[in-house]
């Protein structure tokens, strides 16, 4: 009973880590324009340009350091990497709260990008403590915590911002430090020393992380799937507000409520539906349903001429929440346990690269197609581009599923070079983190 309670606390700690991390990111969104205006003395438009560069700096650091932290966690364990990242986030928010100059914010965003790259480590930790057949469900919980953080964070930030544009930064720092203390007291190490491997700087970079995984060809194809899916996903948070103002004259509260409702539905798809559906029809089928829903939703939004059609396709888009945990579940079964950190580092790097490219591409496409005097007015163009990107992801996934038989159950033959893996039919999970519902067979 004590072990079961400790296991639940461990699971809760990882989910709270992701949730509070995303709340900390979202909590500063409503007040960042005001803070930038105060620091620069410029207009909202000028603040938006600087804000775009801040997003770029954050995403670039995540892209570069995700494989580094993933590989470090494979060498030294997940716990120290996660705790160090939470301290880094605490320092970032405190620095931004007292920033007298804009360049303070850039330093803070760089630190936050490095620390935020530990999301890969959190996902690897989840893979460590979860048997393969339950990983899609657990990855769905991480995705739900991620999404809920983005829903809750802006609401809290907006309310606290009434007391001043710097107040939410203090709150974010407090959340990050509280999470550090929670992890320090509750979080055990999930990767046994016998399963760790040496740190190799050649593998601890975005390209090196991908090349190191080339011995698993299916992984490379699935990373491509995630990249194109994440590339398309940037269209919604980046240009949705401009699109709805242009097409439907939405107010800021209507934009916030619509995105909040989408985020809630997306989280429900990940946390509630992904796991049971994967057990019933298999992870590849669930992933393809999610990708199809995303492609249909983006195309529908692009051509929506009525607000009710817009809401309909937003609802369809929430089903796309099935795709990330299902794809991650398939990915996690392609590599041995002692490479989960490296894998998730590569996954996070692919997502970060999409985050670097996506917002810049989406805003440029929107700007080009909304120039009224150019003869090619079409505000929905970024969503067409997003739909095409999802279709590419769907085609890549369909090929990978056929070529590598992703739907079959893995066996020891899939990783013959890893002697420490358990025999077929058994799951090697540390006793402390074993899920009490799994009842592993006696050895």
Image (tube, rainbow, N blue to C red):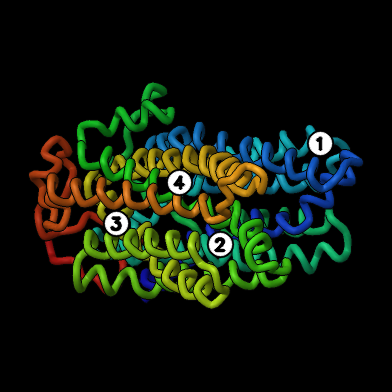
Could you tell me residue 329's position as x and y percent? 29, 56
Could you tell me residue 152's position as x and y percent? 63, 68
Return the disc, 1 or 3, that comes first in the chain's sequence: 1
Which residue appears at 71% of the width and 39% of the height? Answer: 108
Residue depth check, mark 1 versus mark 4: number of the one nearer the observer: 4
The front one of 335 and 159 is 159
Return the disc, 1 or 4, that comes first in the chain's sequence: 1
Which residue appears at 65% of the width and 68% of the height? Answer: 248
Which residue appears at 59% of the width and 40% of the height? Answer: 364
Would you place residue 423 above or below residue 264 in this image? above
At mark 4, the secondary structure is helix
The front one of 395 and 245 is 245
Q: CA distance from mark 1 to mark 2?
A: 28 Å
Return the disc, 3 or 2, that comes first in the chain's sequence: 2
Return the disc, 4 or 3, that comes first in the chain's sequence: 4
Q: CA distance from mark 1 to mark 4?
A: 28 Å
Residue depth check, mark 4 versus mark 3: number of the one nearer the observer: 4
Q: Which mark is residue 329?
A: 3
Q: CA distance from mark 3 to mark 2?
A: 20 Å
At mark 1, the secondary structure is helix
In the visual, does 437 lie left or right of 349? left
Looking at the rendering, which quadrant does residue 175 occupy? bottom right
Q: Which mark is residue 91?
A: none
The residue to which callout 4 is attached is: 231
Quadrant location, the C terminus: bottom left
The front one of 167 and 231 is 231
Looking at the rendering, which quadrant does residue 211 occupy? top left
The residue to which callout 1 is attached is: 102
Asked if one can make out residue 377 in the rendered structure from this viewpoint, the answer is yes
């Amino acid at each position: 009973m004590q072990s079961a309670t400790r296991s639940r606390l461990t699971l809760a700690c990882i989910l709270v880590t992701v949730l509070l991390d995303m709340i900390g990111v979202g909590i500063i969104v409503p007040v960042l324009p005001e803070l930038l205006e105060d620091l620069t003395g410029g207009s909202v438009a000028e603040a938006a340009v600087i804000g775009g560069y801040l997003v770029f700096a954050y995403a670039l650091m995540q892209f570069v350091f995700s494989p580094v932290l993933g590989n470090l966690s494979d060498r030294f364990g997940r716990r120290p990497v996660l705790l160090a990242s939470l301290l880094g986030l605490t320092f970032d928010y405190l620095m931004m709260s007292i920033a007298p100059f804009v360049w303070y914010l850039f330093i803070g965003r760089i630190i936050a990008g490095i620390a935020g790259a530990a999301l890969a480590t959190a996902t690897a930790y989840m893979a460590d403590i979860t048997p393969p057949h339950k990983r899609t469900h657990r990855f769905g919980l991480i995705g739900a915590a991620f999404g809920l953080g983005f829903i809750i964070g802006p609401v809290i930030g907006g309310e606290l911002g009434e007391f001043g544009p710097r107040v939410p930064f203090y709150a974010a720092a407090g959340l990050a430090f509280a999470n550090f203390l929670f992890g320090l007291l509750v979080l055990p190490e999930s990767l046994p020393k016998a399963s760790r491997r040496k740190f190799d700087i050649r593998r601890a970079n975005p390209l090196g992380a991908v090349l190191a995984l080339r011995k698993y060809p299916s992984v490379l194809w699935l990373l491509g799937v995630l990249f194109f899916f994440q590339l398309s996903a940037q269209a919604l948070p980046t240009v949705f507000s401009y699109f709805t103002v242009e097409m439907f004259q939405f107010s800021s509260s209507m934009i916030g409520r619509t995105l909040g409702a989408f985020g809630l539905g997306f989280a429900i798809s990940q946390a509630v539906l992904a796991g049971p559906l994967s057990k019933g029809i298999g992870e590849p089928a669930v992933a393809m349903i999610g990708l199809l829903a995303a492609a249909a939703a983006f195309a529908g939004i692009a051509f929506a001429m009525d607000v009710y059609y817009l809401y309909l396709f937003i609802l369809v888009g929430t089903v796309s929440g099935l795709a990330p945990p299902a794809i991650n579940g398939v990915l996690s079964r392609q590599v041995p346990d002692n490479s989960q950190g490296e894998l998730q580092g590569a996954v996070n790097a692919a997502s970060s690269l999409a985050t670097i490219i996506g917002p810049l591409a989406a805003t440029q496409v929107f700007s080009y197609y909304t120039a009224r005097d150019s003869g090619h007015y079409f505000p929905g163009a970024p969503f067409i581009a997003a739909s095409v990107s999802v279709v590419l992801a769907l085609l890549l996934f369909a090929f990978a599923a056929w070529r590598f038989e992703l739907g079959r159950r893995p066996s020891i033959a899939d990783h013959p070079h890893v002697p420490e893996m358990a025999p077929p039919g058994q799951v090697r999970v540390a006793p402390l983190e074993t899920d009490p519902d799994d009842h592993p067979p006696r050895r």
